[in-house]
Structure formats: structure tokens, C-alpha cells
Image (cartoon, helix red, strand yellow):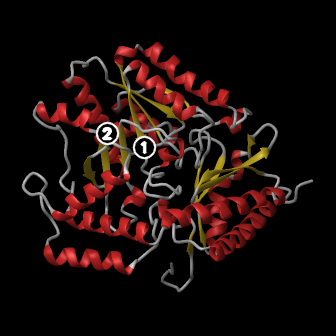
Amino acid sequence: MWDVDGKRYLDGSSGAMVSNIGHSNPRVIDAMRRQMEKSTFGYRLHFETEPSERLAAKVASLSPEGMEKVFFVSGGSEAVESAIKLARQYAVTVGQGSRWKVISRFPSYHGSTLGALALTGYAPLSDPFAPMMQAMPKIPAPRAYLDGIAMDDPATGQHYAAMLEACILEEGPETVLAFIQEPIGGASTGALVPPAGYMQAVREICDRYGILLIHDEVMSGGGRTGKFMGGEHFGVAPDIIAISKGFGAGYAPLGAMIASDRLINPVLDAGGFLHGHTYAGNPLACAAGLAVLEEIETDDLMGNAARVGAVLKSRLQNLMQRYSFIGDVRGEGLLLAFELVSDRQTMQPLPKALNAYSELVELAYAEGLIIYSRRTRGGVDGDHFLVCPPMITSVDQVDEIIDMLTSALDKFSAKAGLAAEMA
């Protein structure tokens, strides 16, 4: 990308992990142009449109078996809102009206609308609006690396999953509607990969208590992790999926909720889904989304994300030898992050006054590299950085990313008075 002064930037975070296939792809733009010549709007209660029908069929074919119903929206917050409202309406329809609580994790981010924000565990974003929301129960995210527990030990997954069961029992199973999680973490946990056995144990617990499992694939879905859905890495299928961001790849506002006939048919039989958005199934957005998926499949971009992502992750891990204050590198495919700490043994964060999560982003920006940052520990302390270039990234561009990032880290360590080299 170039700014108005002609300065060149490498989009090392795909915007906000959105531009999965890069910017201004001519085939996607051509598909949108062709659709604009036909129609740009068709209200979903008045018309079925060819782009929405074709995209729904494609999405169903890429989703877990049996998840064949697709409800289009304009973004991630809408997708999550749709998921929890479908879950609630299903429960009411089948005579389980006592179920209304949606358990989520802390930290987490599920959207900025009030329903999605009630699920979000990120204090600076949610606290100002707390009086306006119905508080929802939270359990700790499975951050084994911070707790000093082995990621590869199945007992670790059981340890964190047991927190979900304990929460269900404390709240009363008859009141719990759903559990929502990101299969691979997004901005709030910085590409967190769950420990061994966690995803399977969570699925078993939800089944045991009749609780719906919602996967928030807004960031991890769309192929960025090397598979179309992040949950595929663990062989676990949810009951409802929310997807957006890279799904439309920034060409048009687009997202979707995906569910099975088991949930949808009772709701339809009872009179229909009490929910909707003006731009749901917009033909222009769906034409763009269909063209994006065609690019991903035709150019094997999921395979490229897996291959190039492995190289980028290795190069980021190598930086740990150069910088003692890089405490962790994590992620899958091209959904990757690294975290800065004061001490790798204790995983204590850097002093908050260093404002690392902002300073390093600005230094990288000056180098011509765009990365994405968040406070690691609920928005209050800690610093992690997402390095998530588009799925079209080459190994040569990985070299360029690492060179610019190294320069930024050198300047940050000097400015902050941190030792760059490992002792």
C-alpha cells in the first residue's frame, strides 16, 4: 500500500486480519462490477438472489458436515449477535426457555454491539457500557503459556475445560444456553492455540449438559489458519459458527452465521427467525464473497497460508534468540502473534509505562510495516502483536517483514532501555 506522499507499506496484519487475499484483486473487482451492472440490492424478504444462493451453497460445502444453513450479515458483531439470538430462539422453541446464559472466556473479544460486548472479556471496551448490558459468565482462556503448564499434555486441556464444567454447575445447567469460543484466538489473546485435548473436552462437556457450542471464526475462519475453519485443526464441529473479516476479505462488508437443520427447522416451524438486517444477503457483497472464495480455492491460498505461515512462525521464533523480551510466539498458518515480557521465567509483562503495544506499532509503521497490537491481559497489562499478512504472501515477503520488524524491535529496545541480545 502507498500513502498520499508515496511512502510504501507492507500490510503485515491484513488491516484488522481482513484482507486475506490482498488488495485490489482484479478478478474480485471484475465480479463486483458485473454484479453492479445487474443489481446492487435485493431485500432478502422480497427476493432470493443468485449471488446469495451460490455463496450459501459454497459456504455450506466448506463447513462441517450437516451445517447447511447460512444467514448472511455485514460483519463480525452482527454474526455473533445472530448466533446467540438463534441459540436463544431455538431454546425457547423447544421448551427450554430457562436457558439464556452464554458463557465466554476472559480475555476475549466477540464484537462491539451490546449483545456481543456482553460476551467480550476486554475491560477497556466493555466496562463503560456495563450498566447497559446483561452480564454473562466468564471462564479463563486456556493460556497455558502464561500459567506455566505444558501445552502438549492432554491433562492441560482437561484442566482448562474443567473450568467450563465448574461454571455450568455453578450457574445451574438449566440456565446455560451456550458456550462461545474462538478456536484460535484473535486480537484479545493474540492467536492463542488451545492446549492438547481442550477443544474435544469442551465439546464433550457441552453435549453432556445440552449446551450449544458456538465457534467465533470471525478472525480464524476464511482460510487464514491453513484450513477454512480454525476449528478444523482439532476435529471438532460446533453447533453454530460466526464468520466474517477475511470471509469477504475487505471487498465488501460481509459475514455469516452457519448452523444445522436441527437448530433451524424448529425455529422456522415456529414462525421464523426473529432477527434480520437490511443488508443481509446483499447481492453485491455476496458476489464479492463468492469471488474471494474462488480466488482462495483456485490459487490454493489455504495451502500457501500453511506453508508460508510455517516459515514466518519459524522466523518469529528465531527472533526470540535475539530479543530476551520476546516471551512467546504462537498461532497457526498466517494467524500469528508474539508477546513481549519482562522475564520469560515468570512471564511478567513489560512495565505498563513503556506503552510497548503502541510504541512498537508506531516504530514498525515508520519502517513501512503494519502490525496489529493489543494489551494481553484483559486490556490492562501486557503487550502482544499480531503478524498476519495476506494469504498471498511469499517467502521473500516474509524476509521483508522480518527485516522491518527487526529494525523496529532494535529501535524499541534501545528506546526502552531493554537488552536486545540474549545473555
Marks 1 & 2, CB-CB < 8 Å contact: yes
Identity, as a three-letter code, of the amino acid under mark 2? Ala
> Going by the image, does 126 lie left or right of 369?
left
Identified at 50% across, 40% down, the residue is 108
Mark 1: few/some/many CA within 10 Å (<14, 14-19, 20+): many
Who's the residue at 59% across and 44% down the image?
192
Q: Which SS class for mark 2?
A: helix
Q: Is residue 178 left or right of residue 337?
A: left
Residue displayed at 40% across by 71% down: 295
Residue at the image position 51 percent from the left and 24 percent from the top: 164
Q: How many marks?
A: 2
Q: Which residue is mark 2?
A: 83
Query: Which amino acid lies under the numbered mark 1 shown in the image of this protein?
Result: Asp
Residue 46 in the image: above or below residue 163? below
Q: Quadrant of residue 407?
A: bottom right
Report the Cα–Cα distance between label 1 and label 2: 9 Å
What residue would you read off at disc 1? 216
Q: Which sits in the foreground, 53 or 168?
A: 53
Give x and y (percent) for residue 263.
Answer: 25, 33
